[in-house]
Image (tube, helix red, strand yellow):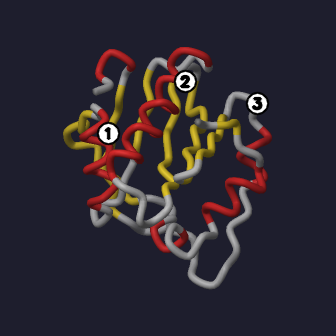
Amino acid sequence: MMDIATQQDIEYLINHPGIYPSTGFPPGETAIIGTFFENPRNVAFTCMYGGMLFNQEEGDVFSGHFLFLPGTKGVDILTAAKGMLQEMFTKHGASVIRGYPPRENRAVRVIGNALGYHKIDNAIFTDDFGRDCETYEVKLSWLH
């Protein structure tokens, strides 16, 4: 079961010691994401395994961010993430959801591939935290 998340829910997850190191935020700082909630089209979900953030990039295109707790079984992550993605497509007007995993974060790429995300060739960039990232996207029809 998933719920719409509050800022407090998401900040708890982002600052969790098992999640924070992969966020790109500087070590030792507390991540505060209040500006995320200022856009009414942005959506955050939580469940017993963690959650996901979806921020609107433009129109009906969103970027998705996995925030699942360490130790969660892959099958549980996939089930929860698929439900959250379907919710974005069916109830929040998304047509495309992109992901920008750092190249060194293999776990995120594996989860994305298992869900049906497709890698966009030659769409590599350096993010605000200095990490080389790849671009993936998924549409409702691609979900596994």
In-image side of 79 versus 28 (left or right): left
Identify the image quadrant of residue 90: top right
Label at residue 40? 3
In-image side of 71 versus 15 (left or right): left
Indicate the amino acid at tag 2.
Glu
Q: Report helix, strand or loop for mark 3.
A: loop
Q: Which residue is under mark 2? A: 87
Residue positioned 62% across, 40% down in the render: 45
Identify the image quadrant of residue 4: top right
Q: How many marks?
A: 3
What x and y, as percent, mark residue 11? Answer: 70, 60
What x and y, as percent, mark residue 117? Answer: 30, 34
Image quadrant containing the C terminus: top left
Question: Looking at the image, which is closer to me, 8 or 27?
Answer: 8
Q: Is residue 131 above or below residue 61?
A: below
Indicate the amino acid at tag 3.
Pro
Q: Which residue is under mark 1? A: 136
Q: CA distance from mark 2 to mark 3?
A: 16 Å
Residue positioned 69% across, 28% down in the render: 41
What x and y, as percent, mark residue 135? Answer: 33, 43
CA neighbours of label 2 inside 10 A, class few (<14), some (14 to 19), many (20+) = some
Question: Looking at the image, which is closer to me, 25 or 76?
Answer: 76
Q: Earlier in the sequence, mark 1 or mark 3?
A: 3
Q: Assess whether mark 3 and mark 2 are in contact (beta carbons under 8 angstroms).
A: no
Indicate the amino acid at tag 1.
Tyr
Residue positioned 40% across, 46% down in the render: 76
What x and y, as percent, mark residue 127? Answer: 44, 59
Q: Is residue 43 above or below residue 126?
A: above
Label at residue 88? none
Question: Looking at the image, which is closer to me, 2 or 18?
Answer: 2
Q: Report helix, strand or loop for mark 2.
A: helix
Image quadrant containing the N terminus: top right
